[in-house]
Image: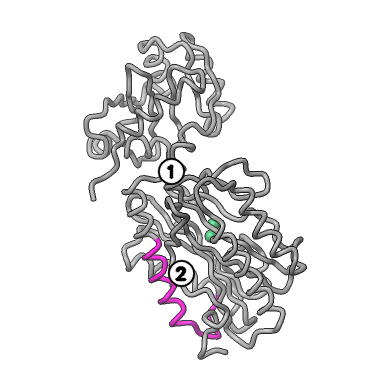
Amino acid sequence: MTGPNYEARRNRLLRKLKDASVDGLLVTGSSNVRYLTGFSGSSGWLFLSSSTTVILSDTRYETQLADECPGLDAEIRDAASTLDDHAARLIAKAKVKRVGIEADYVTLSQHSSLAKKIVSAEIVATSGLIERLREVKDKWEIEQTREAVRIAERGFAVVRSSLRPNQTETEIRFLLEAAMRSFGSTGPAFEPIVGVGPTSALPHAHAGGRCVSESPVLLIDWGAEVKSHYRSDLTRVLITGKPTRLMEQVYNTVLKAQQAAIEAIRPGVKCADVDKIAREIIADAGFGKNFGHGLGHGFGLEIHESVRMSPLSEQVFEVGMLVTVEPGIYLPGKFGVRIEDDLLLTPDGNEVLSNVPREFEEAIVPFLA
Ligand code: ZN
Ligand code: ZN
């Protein structure tokens, strides 16, 4: 499949600038620069206005820029100048009156330096302009994500089939990362969470030294990143010993909440309303205070992107959005259960991209139980 149309993305952004009351924008968020240009280096800014589109970087990236952004005007700074100098000059040359600066990616010291140098235009803080465009994925982005999901699933299958009672969380994490790389991932989408028993009760735990045999509950939250930087994000709990009734009850409550949320997700529905459906099922089962995080999030070039499912969300689902659905119940000191899948919003509802078994019986690892 052919790659993304960066120019079309930039044109869409240019049409949005008016709403933000700016006539030029300095893009400094690296994922935003990547989204608009394809440039994957760590130091690069994009300036755009109706008359000018220029990417700014330094000599380390000269060749990479020519490779990744053919046809795009580039300014390469040398050791004697700064990106601020170049940006200020471009802004003046383009006769921009109000220039947007991405408030979420500029530090206070960068802001004060820019404010000193940009004298020809008024600086306006902008937020979420490009993130809003990134919420709805195109066909190519969805294909990249499908590949990231497929690799994650294959990696998980390797881990599951080679589980041993004396394996540690860290060993499982490394095996998972290696397996995903062997299937074509450029690396994990984020540091995989592998938690046994009490560790699984920490929603964002680091894999440590606990052994599989210490508790029947093993939680794994993982994803793969592919070359284009798109990602997947899944969570499963495996039952590796004789489960208690509480474990089964918690597991099935989380699963019920997830299923109800997945059934409710369709274009036009409010994100907060879906969060509420899942939250009520968990509260009705008596675990309301054990589910403290949002129900899900957008993902793509970054693991957490715009579109948040939480009680505070004011967003509405649209066709083409990619979201996770990940209710959880955490019992401190004991265990936690979270089940997370990746969904694509379709005209009729949604498609669950991930296909790892999720029923309680299917979570039981037979040779250990
Ligand atoms: Zn996750
Ligand atoms: Zn997630």
135 or 280, which lies in front? 280
Q: Earlier in the sequence, mark 1 or mark 2?
A: 1
* Residue 149 image point, x, y percent: 40, 62
Please say if 240 is above or below 298. Answer: below
Quarter residue 41 falls in = top left
The residue depicted at 52 percent of the width and 34 percent of the height is 128
Please state if 78 lies on the left or on the right of 288 as rendered. left
Instruction: Decide whether residue 160 is among the magenta residues.
Output: yes
For disc 2, the neighbor class at 10 Å (few under 14, some 14 to 19, many from 20) is some
- Mark 1, ligand 2, within 8 Å: the answer is no
Amino acid at the residue labelled 2: Phe
Display colour scheme: one colour
Per the image, the residue denoted by label 1 is 136
In this rendering, would 296 be left or right of 23?
right
Q: Which residue is more in the foreground, 368 or 296?
A: 296
Disc 1 residue crowd, few under 14, some 14–19, many 20+, Cα 10 Å: many
Q: Name the residue under label 2.
A: 174
Q: In which quarter of the image is residue 175?
A: bottom left
**Residue under the point 54% across and 55% down:** 265
Magenta: main secondary structure: helix
Res 162 quadrant in image = bottom left
Helix or strand or loop: what does disc 1 sit on? loop
Instruction: Indicate the secondary structure of the residue bearing disc 2.
Output: helix
Magenta-colored span: 149-168
Percent position of residue 172, x then y: 49, 74
Residues at circles 1 and 2 in contact by the CB criterion of under 8 Å: no
- What's the amino acid at mark 1? Val
Is residue 133 highlighted in magenta? Answer: no
